[in-house]
């Protein structure tokens, strides 16, 4: 019964919303030796009624009703009067325990920072190989970076689990960023990873790059790519095209507001 009460406390402390708290108590009975004597009913504290008695009647439930019963008997059976005399103290004691539980943890106050978490997302099955990476390099890198564990199903379902706030969320963000479908018109934050005479290649997520042509670097005339961007710089870009081969074309100037024209003199 301690496990039933401890389970309720653990869930409340973890932040799990419950319809009602559940507590448990065990009522023992030492049956009368003769018709002139009455049965003795004991509330379980040390298990003596189980060792010396004839019954161990475990009852769990809420204030409003019973959720589970488990009964051990050393006698042939119980009559309805014995059952009634067992359930009455079981209810009284159960309510007392529930009151103590509620005094300790009145109600969940959001997910406990130390509680385990499992999040789920769906990626296209064609992206599974990209998420795993050569020899598992990519998935291991995400797990090392975030502290989360990734499990991938064949249909593209990805489970992200971790203990502690922020880890699973960070892992989920990495997965979704890596496997996201590039949408035309969407603005992303990317890193300059290569500079050529004709433009710059920008990494939008691990394994996903796009080209920003020199003509898309700025609203004004650009003589050299390095006049606008530098290696390793983080820039805002807009996806302006994704071709049939999956190549992504980007624009820095489209992600910026066009400068206002100066009034004529």
Image (cartoon, rainbow, N blue to C red):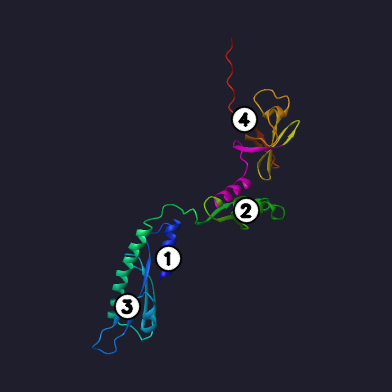
Q: Are marks 2 and 1 in contact (CB under 8 Å)?
A: no
- Upstream in the sequence, badge 1 or badge 4? 1
Give me the C-alpha separation between circle 2 and circle 1.
Answer: 32 Å
- Residue to which mark 3 is pinned: 42
| Mark 1 lies on residue | 6
Please name which of the two marks, 2 or 4, marks the residue nearer to the observer. Answer: 2
Mark closest to the chain's N terminus, 3 or 2: 3
Q: How many marks?
A: 4
Q: Position of residue 153 (x, y in %)?
A: 61, 58
**Closer to the observer: label 2 or label 1?**
1
Q: What is the quadrant of the C terminus in the image? A: top right
Which residue is the site of mark 2? 143
Q: Residue furthest top?
A: 265
206 is higher (above) or lower (below) than 27: above
The residue sitting at 58% across, 47% down in the picture is: 173
Residue at 60% from the left image edge and 56% from the top image edge: 149
Instruction: State which region is magenta.
Output: 168-193
Front residue (pair 146, 225):
146
Query: Dividing the picture into quarters, in which one does residue 160 lie?
Result: bottom right
């Amino acid at each position: 019964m301690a496990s039933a009460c401890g389970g309720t406390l653990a869930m409340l402390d973890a932040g799990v919303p419950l319809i009602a708290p559940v507590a448990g108590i065990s009522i023992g009975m030492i049956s009368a030796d003769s018709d002139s004597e009455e049965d003795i009913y004991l509330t379980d504290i040390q298990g003596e009624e189980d060792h010396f008695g004839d019954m161990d009647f475990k009852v769990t439930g809420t204030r409003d009703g019973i959720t589970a019963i488990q009964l051990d008997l050393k006698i042939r059976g119980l009559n309805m009067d014995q059952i009634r005399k067992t359930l009455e103290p079981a209810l009284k004691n159960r309510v007392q325990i529930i009151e103590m539980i509620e005094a300790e943890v009145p109600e969940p106050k959001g997910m406990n920072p130390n509680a385990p978490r499992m999040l789920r997302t769906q990626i296209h099955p064609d992206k599974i190989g990209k998420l795993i990476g050569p020899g598992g390099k990519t998935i291991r890198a995400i797990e090392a970076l975030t502290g989360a564990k990734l499990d991938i199903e064949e249909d593209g379902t990805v489970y992200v689990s971790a203990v502690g706030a922020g880890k699973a969320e960070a892992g989920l963000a990495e997965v979704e960023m890596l496997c996201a479908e590039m949408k035309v018109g969407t603005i992303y934050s990317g890193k300059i990873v290569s500079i050529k005479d004709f433009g710059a290649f920008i990494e939008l997520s691990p394994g996903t790059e796009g080209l920003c042509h020199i003509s898309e670097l700025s609203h004004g005339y650009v003589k050299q790519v390095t006049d606008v961007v530098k290696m390793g710089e983080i820039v805002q870009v807009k996806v302006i095209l994704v071709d049939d081969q999956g190549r992504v074309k980007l624009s820095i100037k489209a992600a910026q507001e066009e400068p206002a024209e100066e009034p004529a003199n």
